[in-house]
Image (cartoon, rainbow, N blue to C red):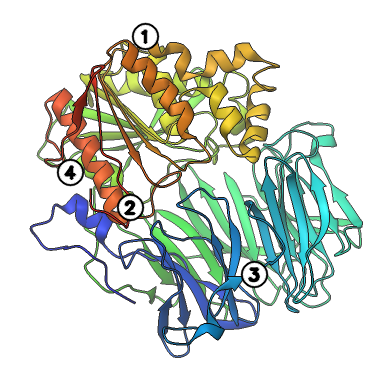
Amino acid sequence: MTETTGSTTDSVPEWEQRFRAPRVSLPDWAEDAPDRALFVSNATGTYELYSWDRATGEQRQVTDRPNGTTDGVLTPDGEAIWWFDDTDGDEFGVWMRRPFHRGEGDGEAAKDEPAAPGLDASYPAGLAIGRDGTAVVGRSTDEDGTTVHIVRPGAAPVEIYRHRESAGVGDLSHDGTLIALEHTEHGDAMHSALRVVRPDGSTVAELDDTESGTKELGLAVLGFAPVAGDTRLLVGHQRRGRWEPMIWDPVAGTETDLAIELPGDVGAEWYPDGSALLIEHGFEARSELWRYGPAAGDGTLVRVETPTGSVSGATARPDGTVEYLWSSAAEPPVVRSTTGAVVLDPPGAKAPGSVPVEDVWVDGPGGRVHALVQRPAAPAEGPFPTVFEIHGGPTWHDSDAFASGPAAWVDHGYAVVRVNYRGSTGYGRAWTDALKHRVGLIELEDIAAVREWAVKSGLADPAKLVLAGGSWGGYLTLLGIGTQPGDWALGLAAVPVADYVTAYHDEMEALKAMDRTLLGGTPEEVPERFEASSPLTYVDAVRAPVYISAGVNDPRCPIRQVENYVDRLKDRDAVHEVYRYDAGHGSLVVEERIKQVRLELGFAARHLGTPGGGSEQAVAHPGGGSEQAVAHPGRATA
């Protein structure tokens, strides 16, 4: 593996060292060739795919693109790698294929080639690859909705599924005779139903909890049993108010309740021989692992020892060991094994640690709100300038996991508060589903309750409160500084929804379906809800200086709706800066990420009188704001 670009010497601030330190994802391994693995790393300064022959120790860089690559899948025999090829982060592209052992100088015969010739570019909607080379490819486009195709070597793709609503490929059975699909044909994009079909598209069985006595219950495909002739499918369900697994046999028509009595959400995957389940349990922003077996519904739980913190992925190996990616807010991520060994240790300088998180529970209008707080290291004393770093999703949650962005703010003397507002996962189905129709406004009620606690407790300086976030967090930032203008001294919004109506019309089809679910219809059907939830509605009330960054190729929070919001700021000479960069919904280029954090730190320093992140300045322009030059990550130095 090539070492990371950029210095990690003592002359470089610790916050930059955290971003530049080489990182690796949890390696994924080929089912029938477990010594062949695929992982993601930023070793070259851009996040790319790498192959790893565990038998020889050889690692090779698989992809090399200006804006990075993270989506890749190994074939079951480990002979080939499928990777998704989009354009500058726009998420619209085709699957490419290359031999596992292809290296430099292997010649034209070994070059990357289209993995599914005959399928036009699309947004990906799931992929499953069979042992005979057959692939099940899910696609999503604005024109066709979701389609699923069977792609056999040397044959034209055959469509086996089509629907306007969002859907995706879940898994393919061990013998390739059953395909599990997740779909939202009922129109609720937050709660999928399941359908198992044959390769010709004919239906074997359906499982739909939205039709049960209690509506709005979701299902998720967790994987077919990894054993020949075994038709059991591991399924996630919400029948008891949270995510937990069960076993469904679509051929036999049986359901086996596992009744794993752990609080919080429970996920699972099969051990390689199908004899047990590896349980990933998430509760109150931390996670742990368990072994449950035998996997017939009458097993017992045995703890798989991991440190306190967050497991971001885990896999059981054929020898019975478990490998997992672990971190905490204070300790950087590492891929560990239950043998005690570090599984994959990239070369180069290690990331400096940060401060641990404190748990805070605050009474909010919809129940107790969980927040994670980081304070500057002693001997600093509050009240501190405080950044409310709001997570995206919205169906996601902040956890006790390592994050370089919040750590950078702590290094500069800020406290950081992260709020798991209603809509967040990990606190039960009712908490996640609570934000419907009053979208954005409900989340901000919870954030406001935590803000009040932060000020009253002496943690936060009320004159130096920053509302910040990316994606949905960026949306809540712009909505918050408009609907709560007296509460925030500064707004920092990355890749945000800024004009909800225009965003709806420009975004990818799967997100349109999600917005229809959240708001109860289209902008034409429920205009009052879109208006109430759109930051653009409140832009004239914004008093805080606002910094916005946006990817010009972003299909999730498209650039046109950001420009509409920025134009309104310009019209009223509002204090603002906007930075546009040549990528999609965020950047996979390390130096670009560092630049964006440096710009945010500098913006805060200029307007709050706090320590800054560097000398990079924005260029003033008419309208009371400033513009940053457009950077092309990986091609030019900004």
Q: Is mark 3 on a helix, strand or loop?
A: loop
Cα separation, mark 3 vs mark 2, equals: 27 Å
Residue 252 at what x, y percent from top left? 91, 62
407 left or right, relative to 171: left
The kind of residue tagged 4 is: Asp
**119 versus 428 height, above or below:** below
Q: Is residue 308 left or right of residue 616?
A: right
Q: Which of marks 1 and 2 is in front?
A: 2
Q: Label 4 vs label 1: CA separation? A: 32 Å
Disc 3, disc 4: CB below 8 Å?
no
Q: N-terminal of the two: label 1 or label 2?
A: 1
Q: Do the residues labelled 4 and 1 touch (CB within 8 Å)?
A: no
Which callout, 3 or 4, points at the residue further toward the start of the chain? 3
Residue 175 placement (x, y as % from top left): 80, 75
The residue that label 1 is drawn on is 541
Where does label 3 land, which residue?
115
Q: Which residue is drawn at 21% across and 68% down?
A: 349
Mark 3 crowd level (few <14, some 14–19, many ≥20, 10 Å Cα)? some
Amino acid type assigned to the residue bearing label 3 in the image:
Ala
Does the CB distance between marks 3 and 2 fall below 8 Å?
A: no
- Image-based side of 154 in relation to 603, left or right: right
Please give the residue where the numbered disc 4 appears in the rendered image: 411
The x, y position of residue 386, in whole percent, is 24, 29
Identity of the amino acid at label 2? Pro
Q: For this view, does 150 lie left or right of residue 591?
A: right
Residue matched to label 2: 633
Q: Tell me the element at label 4.
A: helix
Label 1 residue SS: helix
